[in-house]
Amino acid sequence: MNHLSQTMDKLSNHWRKRAVVNNGGDPSFNIPLEADKEDFLPELLPFFNTPQWRAAPAQMKRDVLSYAWVLYNHKTVYVESELITPVCEDLLKGRYPISCAFKTQEIIAQAMVDEAVHTQMSINAANAILTLRDLPSPEYHRFFMTSRRDHLLSQHADARAKRLVALGIACASETLVTDYLDKIATADTIQPLCRQVTAAHANDELAHSSVFTIILENVIHSLSEEEKELVVRSIFESVAMFANKELDVWRSVLKQLNFPDYEAMLAASSDEPDTAVYVNGVSNLLERTGLTSYREAVAA
Ligand SMILES: [Fe+2]
Ligand SMILES: [Fe+2]
């Protein structure tokens, strides 16, 4: 049995034992809400260090934190539905060059179950907070992340090239877990629902990143040098996509809330560093798939 086949067997067995869906499912239905707890960590807001944030009324700050939780979950839904699922569907339907087709289908179908659970969990957890706080749905156009992905795909007329860009983004996004996951999952100051839902998601994503690494390793064999560069380039594009502070989305929501002086606050926060993402995952992905040497070509 070759290395790919063995690794896929291990991942499949791991999923049967460890996935949230096989261990009681979405925990969000059974977690009592605590109205006095904040729904998100203030220090993760892109405008946390601004004077306008510090000066804002306490209730306004609490509403912003509730929306931060909701936006985080909405973004998760977009990651699952726009970045990951389309690639999984193409993999299932044999639209990528792969070996060990049955096993690939098996681990991808399992990952799709997880992503569907995460989508349901995110929607449930976001709506539970909106209901608790009696807040309307946030109004915003779209996340930078999804419009940037559309832009990157639109640069290629050829269907195969588009699929390779989508694959690079999907594989990278599965390793680019933000600091959010870890920090929220371990913060005992915040709403237990938010903490536990994030911890459940983090549990699955830990196993997931290996699924997508093995898929990339599987596909990469049959690609030309040029195609490998294309995949690596889209992996690096994903880092900036994930680190983006999504200030346009925030602008709409802060306007909706009538947040005092929100334009000045956003202007001040545009100098703040991007959201921290675990870029080590990208280095590991390139190393494990033998793509490290393409890094320089892409950077040039
Ligand atoms: Fe997920
Ligand atoms: Fe995932």
Image (tube, grey):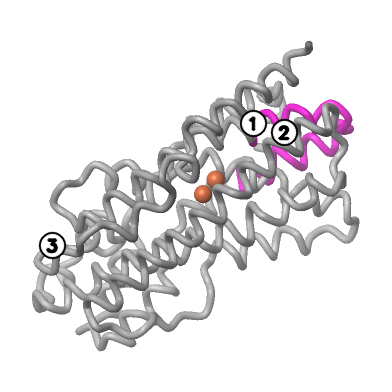
For the N terminus, the quadrant is top right
Please give the residue where the numbered disc 1 appears in the rendered image: 213
Q: Say whether marks 3 and 1 touch (CB < 8 Å).
A: no
Which stretch appears magenta? 212-237
The circle drawn on residue 216 is 2
The amino acid sitting under disc 1 is Thr
The amino acid sitting under disc 2 is Leu
Residue appearing at x 74%, y 20% in the figure:
4
Mark 3 packing: few (<14 Cα in 10 Å), some, or many (20+)?
A: few
Residue 292: name its quadrant: top right
Under tag 2, what secondary structure?
A: helix
Q: Is residue 17 left or right of residue 186?
A: right
Q: Is residue 257 above or below residue 249?
A: below
Residue appearing at x 56%, y 57% in the figure:
79
Q: Closer to the observer: label 3 or label 1?
A: 3
Q: Is residue 252 left or right of residue 50?
A: right
Under tag 1, what secondary structure?
A: helix
Q: Nearer the viewer, residue 146 or 92?
A: 92
> Magenta span has 231?
yes
Which one is earlier in the sequence, the residue at label 3 or at label 2? 3
Q: Say whether marks 3 and 2 touch (CB < 8 Å).
A: no
Q: Nearer the viewer, residue 100 or 276?
A: 100
How far across and how far down the image is residue 114, in percent?
A: 55, 47
The amino acid sitting under disc 3 is Lys
How far across and how far down the image is residue 234, in percent?
A: 68, 46
Q: Say whether marks 2 and 1 touch (CB < 8 Å).
A: yes
Under tag 3, what secondary structure?
A: loop
Residue extending furthest top? 1
Please give the residue where the numbered disc 3 appears in the rendered image: 37
Residue appearing at x 83%, y 58% in the figure:
156
